[in-house]
Image (cartoon, grey):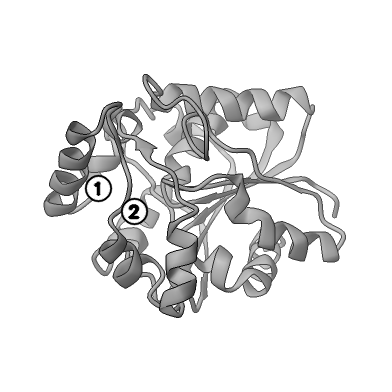
Amino acid sequence: MNEPFVLIHGSWHGGWAWQPVIRELAAQGRRAYAPTLPGHGPDTRRTGITHRHCVESVVAFIEQRDLRNVLLVEHSFGGSMIQKVAEAFPERIQRMNFLDAFVLGDGQCIFDNLPQDMVATFNHLASASAGNTMLVPWEIWRDHFIQDAPEAAARAYWELLSPEPNQVNLDQLDLKRFYGLDVKRSYIFCRQDLSLPPGTSHPQMSARLGTFDLAEMDGSHEVMLKRPAELADKIVEACET
């Protein structure tokens, strides 16, 4: 099995967040790529970036490398990316793997699936910024995203995060074509993920996938940073189901 993995990061992250998992996959002889979405990562333009820009960048990344039989793995916000990427060329996608990821309903945006107090916090931060961006507050990050890390490590990872272009969370997606696709799909659920209220990721959003394979593992929302070897094994297992 030498099908390429394309790993899509979530909010505030960049391709760097997948590097520990890429090393583990490489040790197993697997090819993996982790592009950074437009407006994400350090030292980049964030003003005016939309959800569509991010989707188009992933489509271009796959096309430029002529990747086929792609095993998509998407974390968190990245789930909404892959819903649209799969629409672009389902014939190139062998399987979609949603890692505690958003699965939007037709016509929804990311913020439609978050608690209203969190949405209000993020919108307030964005409106107070110079470029409509927002960064997850330290307290939320520490207590809900990476609560299984020592505080020093959690702080070090938080300092690697970059402000998110807030418009990507507000763009409503037409997903009628996605829900008509016949592409294999899996959902990987992390049992200690506290980033959203219990049941939001799974089974609430995962159920939208219809027929899918479920895999579970221990770990917080930042499982790729805290448990990369276990996650790499779980991803491979999910793709071989």
User: Dot 1 corresponds to which residue?
Assistant: 113
Q: Is residue 131 above or below residue 237?
A: above
Residue ID at (43%, 46%): 12
Q: Which of marks 1 and 2 is nearer the N terminus?
A: 1
Which of the labelled discs sits on residue 23, or is there none?
Answer: none
Which of the two residues, 201 or 41, is positioned nearer the viewer here? 41
On screen, residue 199 versus residue 191, left or right, reads: left
Work out whether 215 lies above or below 111.
Answer: below
State whether residue 194 appears in this view.
no
Q: Is residue 188 left or right of residue 6?
A: left
Give the residue type that dot 2 points to. Answer: Met
* Residue 154 shows in the view: yes
Tell me: 42 left or right of 132.
Answer: right
Residue furthest top as drawn: 48
Point 18% across, 39% down: residue: 123
Give the quarter of the figure containing the N terminus: bottom right
- Residue 238 screen position, x and y as percent: 64, 63
Q: For the point 45% across and 80% down, which residue is it?
A: 150
Q: Which residue is denoted by mark 2 in the rendering? A: 205
